[in-house]
Image: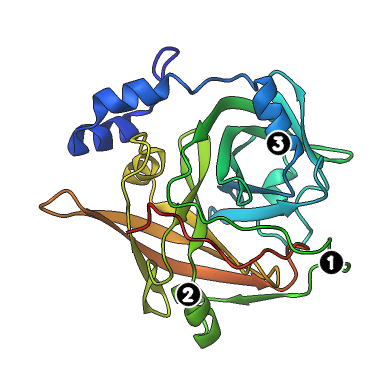
Amino acid sequence: MTEHDPYHPGSRAVQDRVGVRALADHVGRSIGPGIRPVAAAFLALQPMLVVGGRDPDSGRVWASPLTGDPGFVRATGAHQVSVAGGAGAGDPLATALGRPGTPVGTIALDPRTRRRMRLNGRARPTPRGLAIEADQVFSNCPKHLQRRQLVGGRRDGAPQATRVTSELTAGQRRFVAAADTFFIATVRDGGADASHRGGNPGFVRVLSPTELSWPDYAGNAMFLTLGNLTADPGAGLLFLDWTSGTALQLTGTATTAYGPDGERTVRFSVDEAVETAGASPWTWSAPEYSPANP
């Protein structure tokens, strides 16, 4: 990225390959470092923020759910947000978020309104949790985002012990195969990004206990995720059980295959899986699937 170009060379390469540079230039005008009042108001209503980044010790990329009562994420300036609580001690990103200057990508996704907002920057620990200094702030369209409503109040109790494996169990494979939503974290030199992928159940294919794939549906033409993967294949996936709050975090590598008719398929190899029961205290309703889903 340069001062005048919001995209890095990896994203530009994918945009040119797909033939959407002009559209990307138009959409890219919405990317900036400032948190506008409407964005600050949106963040203050959210009960969850997904954060992605790389653990400096293992080198692995993870996507993690941060949750709290609405207001736990709030803008504290034109270029900064604070997050109360931060990541739990057992979260694989906890070490990274405990170090000043860690590059992170975040996404606040509200199933109730089918709106989402992304904020990328650098995190530092604070006495209350963490603060993120924003480099990029922008909103996305509601495409492939399922509508859900909160059911009841916050559940009591801390997250239960995590289960760590080097491949997906039979139950985890069924869970992933039935998912209609997941989050993906990617990194680039000096930066990170967190994004969302959605579709009807079955859009994520489980090829083996260590291999997944999914179609890359047409989106906003930015290609931040695929652009990052062209330079660094490290990726982290987050699958949530929207009813029980269980989180399944996967780390590994991802590659993109381009078909002759412009279709794109991402293939993900699992290095490690972390399953945490009760990672989110919220219960969400059954989904109303996006009309954009194929």
Q: CA gap, disc 3 to disc 2?
A: 29 Å
For residue 228, what is the image quadrant?
Answer: top left
Q: Quadrant of the N terminus?
A: top left
Is 49 placed above or below 252 here?
A: above
Q: Quadrant of residue 7?
A: top left
| Sequence-earlier tag: 3 or 2 | 3
Which element type, helix, strand or loop, lies under badge 2? loop
Rounded to the nearest angstrom, the CA distance separating label 1 from label 3 is 21 Å
**Colouring scheme applied when the structure was drawn:** rainbow
Residue 79's place in the image compared with 138, above or below, is above
Kindly identify which residue carries mark 2. 178
Q: Give the alpha-carbon distance from disc 2 to disc 1, as whole Å.
A: 24 Å
Looking at the picture, which amino acid does disc 2 mark? Ala
Q: Is residue 58 left or right of residue 217?
A: right
**Would residue 260 appear left or right of 16 to someone viewing this image?**
left
Residue at the left extreme?
A: 260
Q: Which mark is residue 169?
A: none
Indicate the position of residue 81 as horizontal and vertical percent values: 73, 30
Q: Is residue 168 visible?
A: no
Disc 3 marks which residue? 43
Are there few (<14), some (14-19), or many (20+) residues within 10 Å of tag 2?
some
What residue is rendered at 56% in x and 71% in y?
273
Where residue 207 appears, as percent x and y from the top left, is 34, 77
Against 205, residue 7 (above or below) is above
Residue bearing the label numbered 1 = 155
Mark 1–mark 3 CB contact (< 8 Å): no
99 or 264, which is in the foreground? 264
Q: On the rendered structure, is 240 left or right of 47?
A: left
